[in-house]
Image (spheres, rainbow, N blue to C red):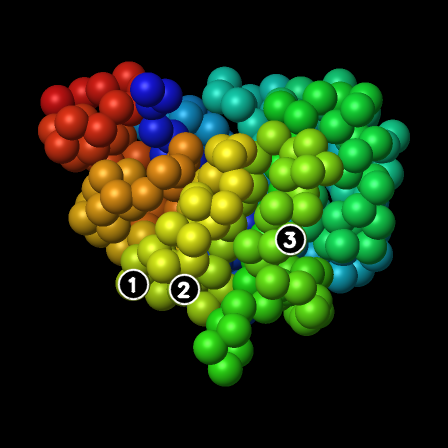
Amino acid sequence: MLKKRIIPTLLWKNFGLVKGKKFDSWRRVGTVLPSIKIYNSRDVDELFLLDINATIENREPDEQSIKSFSSECSVPFCVGGGINRLSQIEYLLASGADKVCINSAAYNNPTFIKEAVKIFGSQCIVISIDYKTINGKKICYSNSGKLKIEKDPIEWAKEMEQAGCGEILFTSIDHDGTLEGYDVVGIKKLSKSVKIPIIASGSAGNFEDFIFLFKNLDISGAAAASIFHFTEITPKLIKNQLAKNNILVRDMYI
């Protein structure tokens, strides 16, 4: 059985890191390099760094900054934001990123994902699916939650699996930043619909949220942000609790 992953998500906006609720990310919570260095010492399994303004501002990924950040990151490093060309992926991977996370460009050009997988391998391509529930129906969103896409997130996940992506970052905008737990119903439905690894996101508030997630749902990892910014809980403490509940994690400390 594969070990479960705890993955902090860093939301990068302009010159710093931000966090808010339901994709309204306004509160500054630090800067990138110090945060990466801290997480390196806290037994995380991966780090996600998402430039949440790149697509909205129609600008390139900040490749030089990514190169600087990745040089300080000792765990697998996934970057996203503004990625819509194969040349960008090539440069980001050459600059030290282990994976890229793609959202908006997949909707705009689904063949882009197939091409990226063919060239770089499925293990490098993470598809981010952000969604809201409106009148009882789940709807996809792009552009950091600003643009409604008339697609069902589960069906879109199936399409992206067929396109060859390696895993899915599945984020409930309604839950994001609330510290009220994950969208268990939505994640469960997704886990029964695709075979590729799933990273659940939005929004753990305590140890029990992680324990329930891994005990009851077939997922690979749990991404989180607010719990690390606004509580005393660390990735290491979470992994200790998971291990005590007989959930396999990397680098167990009991």
Side of 22 relative to 99 (left or right): left
Q: Callout 2: few (<14), some (14-19), or many (20+) C-alpha neighbours within 10 Å?
A: many
Question: In the rendered structure, which amino acid carries the disc numbered 2?
Answer: His
Q: CA distance from mark 2 to mark 1?
A: 7 Å
Q: Is residue 199 visible?
A: yes
Residue at image position (50%, 54%) is: 171
Q: Earlier in the sequence, mark 2 or mark 1?
A: 2
In the picture of the structure, the residue carrying the numbered disc 1 is: 180
Q: Are marks 3 and 2 in contact (CB under 8 Å)?
A: no
Residue 26: x, y in percent? 53, 66
Residue 135: x, y in percent? 50, 82
Q: Earlier in the sequence, mark 3 or mark 2?
A: 3
Residue 175's tag is 2
Question: In the rendered structure, which amino acid carries the disc numbered 3?
Answer: Trp
Q: Are marks 2 and 1 in contact (CB under 8 Å)?
A: yes
Residue 239: x, y in percent? 25, 30
Please tell me whether mark 2 sits on a helix, a strand or a loop.
Answer: loop
Residue 156's tag is 3
Q: CA distance from mark 3 to mark 1?
A: 26 Å
